[in-house]
Each structure stands twice: as C-alpha cells, then as structure tokens.
Amino acid sequence: MLPGFEVATVKPAKGGGHENWNVDSNWTRIENAKMVDLIRDSYGLGTDAQVVDGPDWLRTERFDVAAKVGEAEYARESKLTGKAGEEAYQGLMQSFLKERFGLVVVRETRKEPIHALLLQGTAASTALRPTALGPDGTPLHGRHSMGRMGSFECSGVTMEDLAGMLSNKFELEQLWVHDETGLKGYYDFSRKYAPDRGKGVAADATDPGLVDALREQLGLRVKKQVGDVPVVVVKELRRPDFD
C-alpha cells in the first residue's frame, strides 16, 4: 500500500499564471497545475505526451493543492537520499491522486520519437565539472538544479537528471530526452541559451539556441530517433470534491 499525506486539500486554481510547486519541509503546495502535470511529475515522467488517454479536462483544468506529510512519515522520508527519496515522494503523490481523483493507471513502454542525449565528441566538455563528493560518495554540498527561461544552474546532477530537465522543452519538440552519454557520476555546470519556444531563435539574440548551447558550452548533442518510452495509460479519473 502506498503511503499518504496526513492532510490534503484540492481547490480550483485561483487564476492565470505559471504552474508552481513548492515543497517546504513536510508541506507541498502546488498552484495552477493541470492534471496532466500532476500525473507526469507523480510518476517521474519527462513529458506530457507520456500521459496517455483520459478525459480531455486533464489537459485543460487547473488545480491548487496543499498537502502535509505526517511527522512519522516525514521523519522516515527525510533520511532517504537520491532516487530512494524521489520515489518515496512520488509514492505520496500517487496515493493522493488515487484518493482524491480516483486515478487508476497502467504503466507501459511504447515506441515513440525521442531525443537521445549524446557526447558531441569522445569526451565531455570541461564545462561539465565533476562534483566534489563526500566520504559516502554523494555530492558534498547536496544536489541542486535551477532552471529559468534561458538558463540552467546545476550542481551535483547526473546526465540522467539533465535529460529530465531537457524533456518537454519546446525547443526539442516537447519530446522525451534519454541519456545516452555514457557519463556516470555527478556534475556541476551552468548554461545560458536563447529560448525560442520552438519558433526559432530571435535575430537579435545574444546567446545561442538550446541545441547550440548544449554543443558549444557542454560538449553534448541531441539526436532524434525512435526509442522505448515509458508511459502511463489513464484508465480511470474523476474530478475531485473540492475542499
């Protein structure tokens, strides 16, 4: 059985604006999120396209969520790191979606267009700096990533993490990006690029586009191909009773 939140409320989103997730201690606050966003992040998916089927409203209606983890569960989860911590939190969200939205899904793998993340040459760029590690082999100063429109600032991240950040980008056709660099371990890096929302870089842009920035700044490239894509197929879903 999946763990659950101690307290959770769901309300229609207050208005426009961007989706915002804020996890602070044992509280999760989500604003202006579509159901497809909630499912995507709760199941560790990279793109909206990996959420298959379901009613039309899951891609249009938006919700505000506030949820609190109980003290005992929070104490247990706070000791988890890396993948184990991510999966524990995703379990909380999956349980919440099942309880409040009646969500039932089936996991599948399908052949779909993807972008493979590859090395541009035979070695990584020096702009990908190996992260300083502690005695336990994990990043000494933790793992942090901040993505803004046109930039990334990352420390202690893997190439798999980077592929996840690149997934669903308009500049990459909102496709799933799969790490095929062969690079292991953790890296620190920063990157600036001219966002184009898939419409081409503006003529007066001072930074390169995303694909060029990956190549020129990080020594990486993307290649479109067909690959195995994990998806969740929505079998059951209902609108919630609002609090």
Image: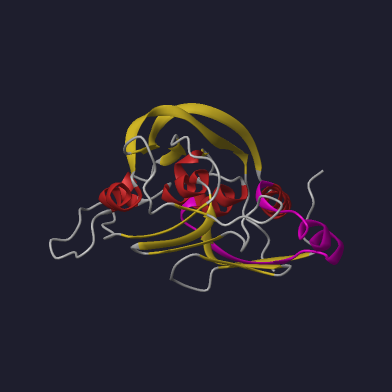
In the rendered image, residue 35, in percent from the top left (x then y), is placed at 55, 53
In the image, is residue 61 above or below residue 103?
Answer: below
Tell me which residue sits at (12%, 61%) in the image.
203
Residue lying furthest bottom in this view? 14
Residue 239: name its quadrant. Answer: bottom right
In the rendered image, residue 4, in percent from the top left (x then y), is placed at 78, 55
Is any atom of residue 163 visible in this view?
Answer: yes
In the rendered image, residue 126, in percent from the top left (x then y), is placed at 38, 51
- Front-lying residue, 150 or 189: 189
Q: Is residue 32 left or right of residue 102?
A: left
Number of labelled discs? Answer: 0
Tell me which residue sits at (61%, 45%) in the image.
43
The residues colored magenta run 59-83
Tell me which residue sits at (44%, 67%) in the image.
18
Tell me which residue sits at (43%, 40%) in the image.
176
- Front-lying residue, 124 or 48: 124
- The quadrant of the image that shows the N terminus is top right
- Asked if residue 78 lies in the magenta stretch, the reply is yes
Residue 139: name its quadrant. Answer: bottom right
Q: Is residue 133 left or right of residue 48?
A: right
In the rendered image, residue 189, in percent from the top left (x then y), is placed at 43, 57
Q: Is residue 49 left or right of residue 76?
A: left
Colour scheme of the picture: secondary structure
- Asked if residue 91 lies in the magenta stretch, the reply is no
Is any atom of residue 56 visible in this view?
Answer: no
Residue lying furthest left in this view? 203
- The quadrant of the image that shows the C terminus is bottom right
